[in-house]
Amino acid sequence: MAQGLKVYYDAGHADDPVVVTTPQQVRELLATVRDKHPAGNAVLLTIVHAEDPWSSELNAGLDGDVGVLHYSGEDHPDGAYSHSRMPSNSEPVIYYYVTADTEFPPDSEVTAADVEDAVVAYLATNQRPETVPWQTGHRPPQGPE
């Protein structure tokens, strides 16, 4: 069986994720997601390897022509966020997985093409994609004590 990814971005995917096995299928899926969630509707996808879903996880967010990435796995247990090569979002941004919001740190928004390339690389390697720079150490702000 070909190595594949299970992709979750809709409530209906809990028991029936989208499965992609080729770079072309990744590109088609991300185009479909961008069409379904136009700019201003930041959507977050959770992506795991079909054969080894507990070894790592890639979150890929899309919001029009930009997006974000978060990777965590056995090789990076504390996780890492995408880091733009040029200044991007100066404040934290929120992306939504179904109705749950997830905060991404400043300068984490990269191009949608970078997100696509990273998901294709993840399909091939099951490791943190080397197609984008990464940043670590972000912790969401805590409320008043």
Image (spheres, rainbow, N blue to C red):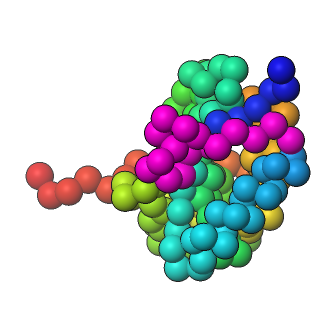
| Magenta-tinted stretch | 7-22
Vertical side of 51 occupied by 30: above or below: below
Q: Can residue 17 be seen in this view?
A: yes
Vertical side of 30 occupied by 37: above or below: below
Q: Quarter of the image holding residue 19?
A: top right
Horizontal relation, residue 116 to residue 59: left or right: right
Q: Is residue 10 magenta?
A: yes
- Pick the quarter of the image with the N terminus: top right
Residue sitting nearer the eye, 139 or 17: 17
Vertical side of 74 occupied by 18: above or below: below
Q: Position of residue 138 (x, y in %)?
A: 47, 49
Residue at the image point whose x is 47% and y is 48% from the top: 12
Q: Residue furthest left?
A: 145
Q: Does the magenta stretch include residue 51?
A: no
Horizontal relation, residue 97 to residue 70: left or right: left
Q: Position of residue 64 (x, y in %)?
A: 65, 76
Q: Where is residue 59 in the image (x, y as percent from the top left)?
A: 58, 47
Residue at the image point whose x is 45% and y is 60% from the top: 96
Residue at the image point whose x is 81% and y is 37% from the top: 21
Residue sitting nearer the eye, 98 or 89: 98
Vertical side of 44 occupied by 106: above or below: below
Horizontal relation, residue 20 to residue 24: left or right: left
How many numbered markers are drawn?
Answer: 0
Q: Position of residue 65 (x, y in %)?
A: 70, 75
Residue at the image point whose x is 75% and y is 41% from the top: 20
Q: Can residue 129 be seen in this view?
A: no
